[in-house]
Amino acid sequence: MKKIVILFSGEGKNLHNIIEKLHPNVCEVVCAITNKADAKGLNGLQTKSLQAIKSEVLEHTSFSSREAYDTELVKLIQSYEPDLVVLAGFMRILTSVFTQNIKAINLHPALLPKHKGAKAIEESFGSSDTMGGISVHWVSEELDGGEVISQKSFLKSEDETLESFTRKIKELEYELLPETITKILYKL
Ligand code: GAR
């Protein structure tokens, strides 16, 4: 069975969705790692499946540099020997310590290469773009700049609000990320 590690920082809705759709039949989620001790996504991992999903908290606040944090993160990830690492709302800028050692994909809530960065939903909603959408891409040294693997999009409606726009993005994320993980792991 292929193994994945998932990194997250907050709500963890994508983390929980991946577990529900893929674990343990398509792949094994061997660990969920967060940089925030109060991440909401930590809740419920114990009861997520017949066997609890293992989680680890590695807080970035106790490290003096991004490189020092990434060194520990890489060690922790490698101890689980995953086939793939999935960044699902992991809100950290990563250094080459991470990108040169870990094969990872990232979920981004916009149609890359447009609207990189942490305010992607607000920026793409506020732009003159006629479409909204999401991307899954390989993690590289450039923030949100690695090769795009898959995307899904929708037409903005005339009465679109930030709330409806955000909801459409989330719905697409829950479809595309598990699909893409499956395709990468089994080279479909
Ligand atoms: C998701 O919408 C994801 O696209 C976004 O964070 C959210 C995490 O939600 N990621 C980024 O903005 C990365 N630049 P979740 O914690 O509920 O899965």
Image: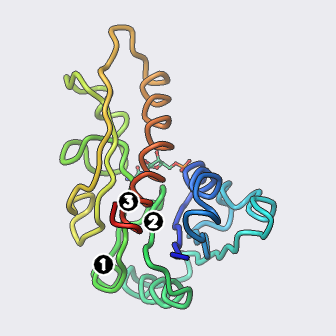
Label 1 environment density (alpha carbons within 10 Å; few <14, some 14–19, many ≥20): some
Q: How is the image coloured?
A: rainbow
Lower position in the chain sequence, tag 2 or tag 1: 2
Asked if the beta carbon under badge 3 is closer than 8 A to the nearest atom of ligand 1, the reply is no
Lower position in the chain sequence, tag 2 or tag 3: 2
Q: Which mark is residue 49?
A: none
Quadrant position of the N terminus in the picture: bottom right
Label 2 secondary element: strand
What residue sits 47% from the left and 21% below the top? 164
User: Which residue position holds label 3?
Assistant: 183
User: Which residue position holds label 2?
Assistant: 86
Task: Inspect the image, locate mark 1, and give the three-letter code of the amino acid beneath it.
Answer: Thr
User: Which residue position holds label 1?
Assistant: 99
Task: Inspect the image, locate mark 3, and give the three-letter code of the amino acid beneath it.
Answer: Lys
| Cβ–Cβ under 8 Å for marks 2 and 1 | no
What residue sits 52% from the left and 67% below the top? 7
Of the two numbered discs 2 and 3 in the rendering, the one whose residue sits closer to the viewer: 3
Provide residue 92's location: percent of width, then percent of height. Answer: 42, 65
Image quadrant assignment for residue 128: top left
Label 2 environment density (alpha carbons within 10 Å; few <14, some 14–19, many ≥20): many
Image quadrant assignment for residue 156: top left
Of the two numbered discs 2 and 1 in the rendering, the one whose residue sits closer to the viewer: 2
Provide residue 141's location: percent of width, then percent of height. Answer: 23, 72
What residue sits 21% from the left and 66% below the top? 142
Asked if the beta carbon under badge 2 is closer than 8 A to the nearest atom of ligand 1, the reply is no
Query: Who is closer to the viewer here, 120 or 140?
Result: 140
